[in-house]
Image: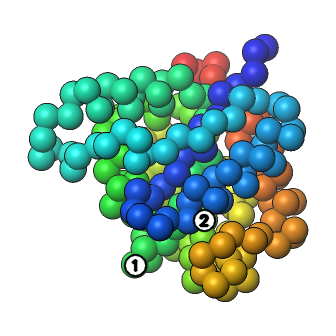
Amino acid sequence: MSKLNIGIILGSTRQGRLSPQVGEWVKQIADQRGDANYEIVDIADYKLPLLGEADATEQATAWNTKLAGLDGFVFIVQEYNHSITASLKNALDFARDAWNNKAAGIVSYGSVGGARAAEHLRGILGELSVADVRIHPALSLFTDFENGTVFKPADLHLVNINGMLDQVLAWSGALKVLR
């Protein structure tokens, strides 16, 4: 079987966001494994307008084409007001079939590790027929980010990152049969 393609989805588009640092860290760990093709997918690159407010045929087509070529996902999710960002929700809503029958892991961060955002995302993923895996690395703004801006994760997160990736690959491979 050929290697699976896993997208590491950056869940924020705002200036000064921390998700690129976290996403690069996850990708470094994932690439060292050599067990799949991992790539950063930045929703900011697709410039999706708010769903229904403008003709977004070109952006939506590019977004759906990217997602269709992926077998699974790792979402980098930050907590905003106990939930995911509006830009991530919008990006999720711009696709339907491209998400179906794929697996996803969640790496979250926030004042309580982004746990509330991750739980919110799980409900949305269920509606999109995405199987989210159990292991969930949760990063603290207080202990894993120096001055709240420079990502310096504790080594203890490596076990959870690798466990999550193991589950994402197992489920992505199994679900590929359905697609």
Q: Classify mark 2: helix, strand or loop.
A: strand
Q: Name the mark on residue 106.
A: none
Q: Name the mark on residue 81.
A: 1
Question: For residue 62, which quarter of the picture?
Answer: top left
Name which residue type carries label 1: Asn
Q: What quarter of the picture does the C terminus occupy?
A: top right
User: Residue 80, position in %: x, y?
Assistant: 42, 74
Q: Are marks 2 and 1 in contact (CB under 8 Å)?
A: no
Whether residue 106 is visible: no
Instruction: Answer left or right for 138 relative to 163.
Output: left
Residue at 86% in and 38% down: 33
Q: Classify mark 1: helix, strand or loop.
A: loop
Instruction: Answer left or right for 52 relative to 76.
Output: left
User: Residue 139, position in %: x, y?
Assistant: 68, 72
Name which residue type carries label 2: Ser
Residue at the far top: name it.
Answer: 1
Crowd rating for badge 1 (residues with CA inside 10 Å; few <14, some 14–19, many 20+) = few
Whether residue 75 is visible: yes
The correct choice, above or below, for 144 with respect to 92 in the image is below
Q: What is the C-alpha distance between the residues marked 2 and 1?
A: 14 Å
Crowd rating for badge 2 (residues with CA inside 10 Å; few <14, some 14–19, many 20+) = many
Q: Which residue is mark 2?
A: 108
Instruction: Answer left or right for 34 relative to 63.
Output: right
